[in-house]
């Protein structure tokens, strides 16, 4: 959803109140980014649609969650300069919120207007794999039932623990995601206490799910 703040203010109090409720509708405002642009709302909307949904190399329709600040933060590093420049070519500034509700500015390429293109947008298989890789902590939290609403003000702390779990699991060399989930469940349930006093990379390398649950904290 795109909202023109100037038009919303001009529309009167009822619209302003509704927009105000939308702004705080999601924890830490992770659904909210702020774009400064000289173009009108229809032009910006049409432009962003090119990136919000695209086909991969296998002709599968995929969605890029531009409205999710948890993914938005990774796009400047994930995309090529040409892709990121094309996406941001109509923008003067783009701000997003992190898990602590801090408003931060995205780094936009200089002379980005020259990258604007009408060619279909597409992320390569390696870029899609990288996107999946960096979103693993959020996927783990979701699998364990930790939603932004249930985590509330502790969302950043939960994400940090989930990131530690993913890092240790990868260090172990395990390719079993059920091992990651069992490990993450134990660590998060103990608010990180389970990380202490164990050589977890070695334990997870040849782990059995029941043994993970039975390891004392």
Image (cartoon, rainbow, N blue to C red):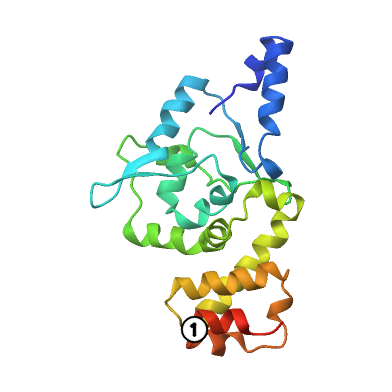
Instruction: Pick whichever, 44 or 24, lies toward us.
Output: 24
Asked whether, in this view, residue 185 is left or right of residue 121, the answer is: right
Asked whether, in this view, residue 190 is left or right of residue 137, the answer is: right
Instruction: Pick whichever, 182 or 38, lies toward us.
Output: 182
Q: Position of residue 126 (x, y in %)?
A: 36, 62
Location of residue 193 (image quadrant) = bottom right
Which element is circle 1 on? loop
Q: Who's the residue at 56% across and 25% down the image? A: 38
Instruction: Pick whichever, 96 or 24, lies toward us.
Output: 24
Q: Is residue 177 visible?
A: yes
> Callout 1 environment at 10 Å: few (<14), some (14 to 19), or many (20+)?
few
Q: Who's the residue at 68% across and 50% down the image? A: 150
Q: Position of residue 217 (x, y in %)?
A: 72, 82
Q: Is residue 99 visible?
A: no
Q: Who's the residue at 66% across and 10% down the image? A: 11
In the displayed structure, would residue 178 be above or below residue 142?
A: below
Q: Who's the residue at 50% across and 85% down the image? A: 207
Asked whether, in this view, residue 28 is left or right of residue 172, the answer is: right
Asked whether, in this view, residue 54 is left or right of residue 209, the answer is: left
Q: Position of residue 184 (x, y in %)?
A: 59, 70
In the image as oriented, which residue stretches furthest toward the right? 153
Instruction: Pick whichever, 179 or 213, lies toward us.
Output: 213
Residue with the mark numbered 1: 208
């Amino acid at each position: 959803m795109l909202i023109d703040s100037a038009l919303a203010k001009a529309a009167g109090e009822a619209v302003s109140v509704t927009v105000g409720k939308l702004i705080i509708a999601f924890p830490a405002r992770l659904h909210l980014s702020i774009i400064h642009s000289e173009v009108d709302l229809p032009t910006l909307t049409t432009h962003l649609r090119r990136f919000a949904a695209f086909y991969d190399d296998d002709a599968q329709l995929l969605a890029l969650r531009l409205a999710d600040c948890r993914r938005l933060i990774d796009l400047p590093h994930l995309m090529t300069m040409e892709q990121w420049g094309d996406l941001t070519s109509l923008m003067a500034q783009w701000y997003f919120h992190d898990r602590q509700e801090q408003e931060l500015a995205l780094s936009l390429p200089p002379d980005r207007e020259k990258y604007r293109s009408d060619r279909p947008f597409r992320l390569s298989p390696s870029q899609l794999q990288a996107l999946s890789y960096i979103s693993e902590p959020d996927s783990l939290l979701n699998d364990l039932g930790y939603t932004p609403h249930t985590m509330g003000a502790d969302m950043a702390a939960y994400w940090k623990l989930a990131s530690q779990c993913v890092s240790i699991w990868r260090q172990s060399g395990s390719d079993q995601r059920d091992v990651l989930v069992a490990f993450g469940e134990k660590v998060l349930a103990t608010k990180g206490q389970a990380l202490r006093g164990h050589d977890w990379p070695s334990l997870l390398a040849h782990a059995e799910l029941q043994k993970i649950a039975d390891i004392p904290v």
